[in-house]
Image (spheres, rainbow, N blue to C red):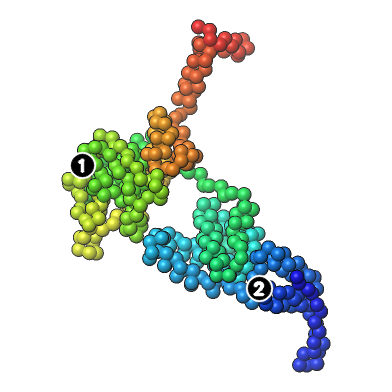
Amino acid sequence: MASVAKRKWTNAKGEQKENWEVLYKEGGKHRSQTFKLKRHADAFKRKVENELHEGTHVASADGVTLDAAAADFERHLEDRMISGALGKQTARNYRGHLRNHVLPTFGRHKFHEIRPVEVHDWFRGLMKNGMKKRGLGLGAAGGGLSGQFARRSLNVLSIFFRWGIPRSYAKTNPCIAGLAMLGGVRKSKIETFTREDVVAILRAVETRAWKHHDSTHAILKCSVHLAVFCGLRIGEIMGLTRPNVMLDAGIIQARHSLTCDDELKGPKSKSGIRDVPMPPHLVLLLREYLAKHHIPNRPDLVFRTRSAKDGGEPAQIVFGVFRANSWHPLLARSGVTSGAPHFHALRHFAASLMIDEGLPLTEVASLMGHSTFDMTLQVYAHPLVNGHRRRAACDAIANSMLGAPIEANSENGRAPLRIGCA
């Protein structure tokens, strides 16, 4: 399939030169590659023969670097965004991972030259050292990335390859084998609030911060209660429309999510479309908000604010501003400064609370909008009971099986086991 031959010639200065040439045929074309050393030529010959046998070979002359293809790939993302197949925020995230993490390492590489082991080492480097900027080396970002965030960069590289394979830039996707070499990515530990934390937050949110308008305080209060007692995400809260808030029936219809670009989109999956019951106090809270503070707007969203730039026109409540100006100060006022600073942790608490109060796991999964209860159990179910309650539960189980409480013998610390004795 391939052969190695010594090639000799005389240059313009009359000097004798020689090298080793690998000759092979691929796709009906005669190809060649030259090397100074025979062992390099032999290694390339074996590599070419294996790739030709597996159908994965791409000639160096036909190779394209990731840098050269990046502009076309970003236009592809733009086209998908315009067609509605990709959200603006997702497209922005893809571009960020591509420019900050993928191209600085692989930009000068040709698609077919990237090997799974290189993908593996790059991924580990992201988690250990953070971003790599050209000329600055590893660690330019000041610390490593979390496993989940680094996995997003790996996902973008994989999408880049899936886009490039039909264009003959590569024959295989090294990210698949690279991910297999990683043996899975450990997820970051998810923190949640304790009952005491949430009680403190609920008490603190009753008092309006001195710099907040009444409407700003009302939005924060409603958002906290919707997250704690209904388990809604912040995007679902800000994406609620008036028809979705059925006050007379005491039902929240989760049908939309508001993106950072003020786009009202559907849920992540069909299971995200759900009806969530509201406790009576939340019905009163929302009824009061709609009567006093609701701003009429074209999408008929429940929560909007007035824009200072557009003459007081209804505007989106920016998530970053909400966190910085409302959520974080609320945590400071409540005295909750550690554990779970993210607003999304309230949703985790809601799921754990439902389970702790005896609601079946399948029902909790349905209320949270999960397609399977495995997600609820593995990610959202956090223990809320303390050691005393656990001990009491274990004692109750033992007593129900043994028939009577057992006390340790004062002499040897043991008691006779009498199952079923009164």
Could you tell me which secondary element the residue under label 1 belongs to? helix
Q: Which residue is mark 2?
A: 27
Q: Which mark is residue 287?
A: 1
Pinpoint residue 235: horizontal percent, then vertical percent.
35, 50
Q: Nearer the viewer, residue 154 or 319?
A: 154
The alpha-carbon separation of the residues under discs 1 and 2 comes to: 71 Å
Q: Is residue 415 left or right of residue 8?
A: left
Name which residue lies at 44% across and 30% down.
385
Q: Residue at x 40, y 44 (%)?
A: 271
Q: Residue at x 64, y 53 (%)?
A: 181
Front of the two marks 1 and 2: 2
Q: Quadrant of residue 333?
A: top left
In the structure shown, which secondary structural element does the residue marked by tag 2 occupy? Answer: loop
Q: Is residue 305 visible?
A: no
Q: Is residue 12 left or right of residue 288?
A: right
Indicate which disc residue 212 carries. none
Mark 1 belongs to which amino acid? Arg
